[in-house]
Amino acid sequence: MDSQEKLSQMLREANLQIMQLQQQVTSLHSEVSAQKSRSLKEEEVSRLKMGEFQQKINSLDKWNLTIRDLDDIPGIRTPRWYEVDIDLAANATQTTFNSAEISPDGPFIITQIQPYFEITDTDPDNFPVSAVAPTGRILPCSAYPFLLSQLGSDVGGAASDLATFFNAASGSYTEIPELSFQFEIAGSGRFWTNRAIPAAALYGESNPLYTGIAGWVERTDRIVVHVTPTATLPYAGRVRMVFHGYQILGHVNIGEALGY
């Protein structure tokens, strides 16, 4: 009897252990199933994120491929003018410079350039021909257009005409400045000229110079103008170099967009 009870007790304990093991197995199956479900969801989320990321990369690549020149750069265009003023004293002969900063609104695209010279001198003694100080009057930065017109009408008298035109007592051309310029982009240190060029090259006598291709200055960069009187300036004045063009509004960097 004792043996049968012991055997029954052992069977009950074995059944209990089996039930416990079955419960543990079931629990493990549930955990594995839940973990598998979580892994599938995480994999799906990761796949979606990778898909979105790849779309962005493809979009950027496509954007980069479509930007071949300034016209391809997105952004609102608005007309804009920048002016660099450089004051020159009477009898100035040395190179002087000044600059203008491009606004943070966006890069500035330069399509035309026009130089002017404004008389600031108020001393009439510095104007022997006119006998008055034409303060505030605007002149070209070179006598070239006047000489070209005058000498072209009388080729035979060119030498004598020159002597007459530039006679301090009677020649009105002595009151017209003769200047040369250099242009520099401050941020890069690039010059647009390899040396100072005469104002006549900028078509300052009539229409503004339309540049061969549009030049640009990045936002917050500076464009620097260097001016050198190639003939002694008899009176004080101010160079007013005007850059015509347009601004691309936005956080645009043209150098990066074009791959420089």
Image (tube, rainbow, N blue to C red):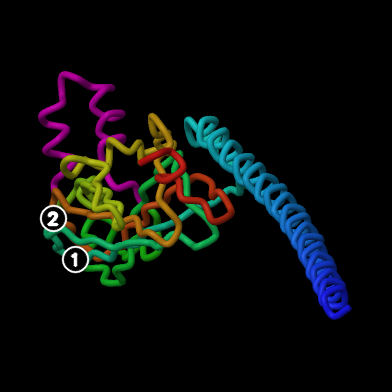
Q: Is residue 143 magenta?
A: yes
| Residue furthest out toward the front | 1
Region of the chain picked out in magenta, as a range? 139-167
Q: Nearer the viewer, residue 24 or 67?
A: 24
Q: Which residue is mark 1?
A: 90
Determine whether 141 is above or below 235 in the image: above
Three-letter code for the amino acid on which mark 1 is drawn: Ala
**Mark 2: few/some/many CA within 10 Å (<14, 14-19, 20+):** some
Other residues around mark 1 within 10 Å, as few (<14) / some (14–19) / many (≥20): some
Q: Report if the CB atoms under discs 2 and 1 are less than 8 Å apart.
A: no
Q: Mark 2: which secondary structure?
A: loop
> Relative to 225, does residue 201 appear above or below in the rendering?
above
Q: Measured from the top left, where is residue 103 in percent x and y? A: 49, 62
What residue do we see at 14% from left, 35% from top? Answer: 162
Per the image, label 1 sits on a secondary structure element best described as loop
Residue 203 image label: none
Exactly how many numbered labels are in the figure?
2
Quick check: 162 left or right of 142? left
* Sequence-earlier tag: 2 or 1: 1
Closer-to-camera residue (214/45) = 45
Residue 208 placement, left or right of 60: left
Reply yes or no: does residue 81 show up in magenta. Answer: no
Q: Nearer the viewer, residue 260 or 81?
A: 260
Q: Residue 56: x, y in percent?
A: 61, 43
Q: Please give the name of the residue rendered at 70% of the width and 46% of the height, measured from the top-left corner.
A: 48
Kind of residue indicated by mark 2: Thr
Quadrant into which the C terminus falls:
top left
Residue that mark 2 sits on: 232
Q: Quadrant of the N terminus?
A: bottom right
Q: Main secondary structure of the magenta part?
A: helix
**Disc 2 from disc 1: Cα separation:** 8 Å
Asked where in the image residue 122 lies, by quadrant, the reply is bottom left
